[in-house]
Amino acid sequence: QVKLVESGGGLVQPGGSLRLSCAASEGSFSAYRMGWFRQAPGKEREFVATINPAGSGIVYGNSMEGRFTISRDNLKNTLFLQMNGLKPEDTAVYYCAGRLGWTLYTSGADYGSWGQGTRVTVSS
């Protein structure tokens, strides 16, 4: 199983931007479908975006498309999430997740590798 470590979270004002990173190790990152999920306080985990091993096959969750961009660099074993136009409702802990293969999954239950999360707070 690939090991994942997120970074890049923090406090940002509404309308601001953040770029999250997820560094992978101990596995064949380029063979994994990767995803971003988030969990706000008191809420269920929510799908944010997913990308296939080649960097295509991208799907976004509701309200993310147009503001968030998922990408990956297989040479650097790193997954990214560029978040623009952040809103207070985007406040959450953001997790990257991975699953070996190409099949499209948007449920967190289908991903076997998870990072520890990085906290994003959108507030003035």
Image (spheres, rainbow, N blue to C red):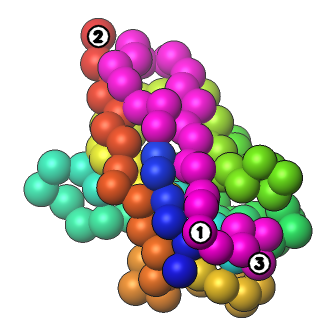
The number of discs equals: 3
Name the residue tied to disc 2.
Answer: 124
Q: Could you say where residue 52 lies in the image, as x and y percent from the top left?
A: 77, 72
Name the residue tied to disc 3.
Answer: 31
**Is residue 99 visible to the viewer in this orientation of the structure?**
yes
> Around disc 2, counting alpha carbons within 10 Å, would you say few (fewer than 14), some (14 to 19), or many (20 or more)?
few
Q: How far apart are marks 2 and 1 (CA)?
A: 39 Å
| Callout in the foreground (2, 1) | 1
Is 67 displayed left or right of 111 in the figure? Answer: right
Q: Are marks 3 and 2 in contact (CB under 8 Å)?
A: no
> Around disc 1, counting alpha carbons within 10 Å, would you say few (fewer than 14), some (14 to 19), or many (20 or more)?
few
Q: Distance between the residues labelled 3 and 2?
A: 40 Å
Q: Which of marks 3 and 2 is nearer the N terminus?
A: 3
Name the residue tied to disc 1.
Answer: 26
Is 124 displayed left or right of 94 in the figure? Answer: left
Residues 98 and 65: in front is 98
Q: Residue at (76%, 78%) from the top-left corner?
A: 31
**Amino acid under label 1?**
Glu
Q: What stretch is highlighted in magenta?
A: 7-31
Q: Could you say where residue 107 lies in the image, as x and y percent from the top left?
A: 47, 80
Q: Residue at (64%, 36%) from the top-left corner?
A: 82
Q: Residue at (31%, 28%) from the top-left corner?
A: 121
Q: Which residue lies furthest to the left in this view?
A: 42
The quadrant holding residue 44 is: bottom left
| Callout in the foreground (1, 3) | 1
**Amino acid under label 2?**
Ser
**Amino acid under label 3?**
Ala
Q: Could you say where residue 38 lies in the image, as x and y percent from the top left?
A: 38, 55
Is 92 displayed left or right of 87 in the figure? Answer: left
Q: Is residue 60 above or below residue 123?
A: below
Judge whether residue 15 is colored magenta: yes
